[in-house]
Image: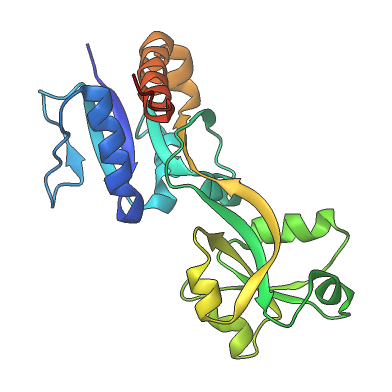
Amino acid sequence: MKRLTLTLPTGRLKDDVVELLSRALSRPLVLPSRQLVVDDPSLPWRIILSHPKDVATYVEHGAADLGLVGKDILLERENEVYELLDLHIGKCVMVLAGPEHLTREALFRREHLCIATKYPHVTRRYLQEKGLNADIVALYGSIELAPAIGIADAIVDLVSTGKTLRENRLHVLEEITPISTRLVANRVSMKTRTLEIEDFVKTLEGVISGANRPETSE
């Protein structure tokens, strides 16, 4: 039987994803350092390694049955995939942040508002829900620089510890949404390989519930 194909993200999430799948396998998942397609017959899945922003696109277009992708990318790209499971890894928060002296109320009172972000579509929807219009500056490097160099009043970005914000004299003005890694499925695969995907989801649910179970002392 043809194995399920999984698309996994490279970059900072890769180690957490590999650890999760290793627990699902009950043995270490070892991926060759330079291979982007891993078709090892000893594994229960065929694996494609891709840039995090491309995972859901590969799944949407049928290159993979399943993918592990950040919720931030799903919100920004709006790929036509089924979101099946919160994997509880890569946790952070998408926030609106600005200079230390700036308050949320003062920012929203400005006649001309400019926000820098890696997530222009999410940011625009967020502001529209508040009845606000703003110029959106799309950046892909150090977003925290934007207020300091005067090209934006505030930023929308992901925050985990808040250390980078503090180092750049920024603070959280408002939390927009929690972010974590999600399991997504191709729409056709969900119809044609339903039982296999459901079994995979149940396996991951068991791994996650085991990891989140509090330790008890005898």
Taking the image as shown, residue 60 lies to the left or right of residue 20, namely right
| Residue 149 versus residue 123 in the image, above or below | below
Q: How many marks?
A: 0
Which quadrant would the C terminus be assigned to in this image?
A: top left
| Point 32% across, 43% down: residue | 16
Residue 78 placed where, x, y %? Answer: 59, 44
Q: Residue at x 27, y 24 (%)?
A: 24
Residue located at (10% from left, 23% from top):
42
Quarter of the image where the N terminus is located: top left
Relative to 210, say whether 37 is above or below. Answer: below
Q: Quadrant for residue 27, please give it.
A: top left
**Position of residue 13 in the picture relative to residue 101 (left or right):** left
Asked whether, in this view, residue 41 is left or right of residue 178, the answer is: left
**Image quadrant in which you'd find residue 155:** bottom right
Residue 128 % position (x, y): 82, 58
Colouring mode (rainbow / by chain / secondary structure / one colour): rainbow
Tell me where residue 34 appears, x and y as whole percent.
Answer: 13, 52
For the residue pair 146 and 178, the one nearer the viewer reads as 178
Please say if 117 is above or below 99: above
Give above or below for 98 relative to 18. Answer: below
Q: Position of residue 98 (x, y in %)?
A: 68, 75
Q: Residue furthest bottom?
A: 149
Q: Nearer the viewer, residue 171 or 66?
A: 171
Q: Residue at x 53, y 30 (%)?
A: 83
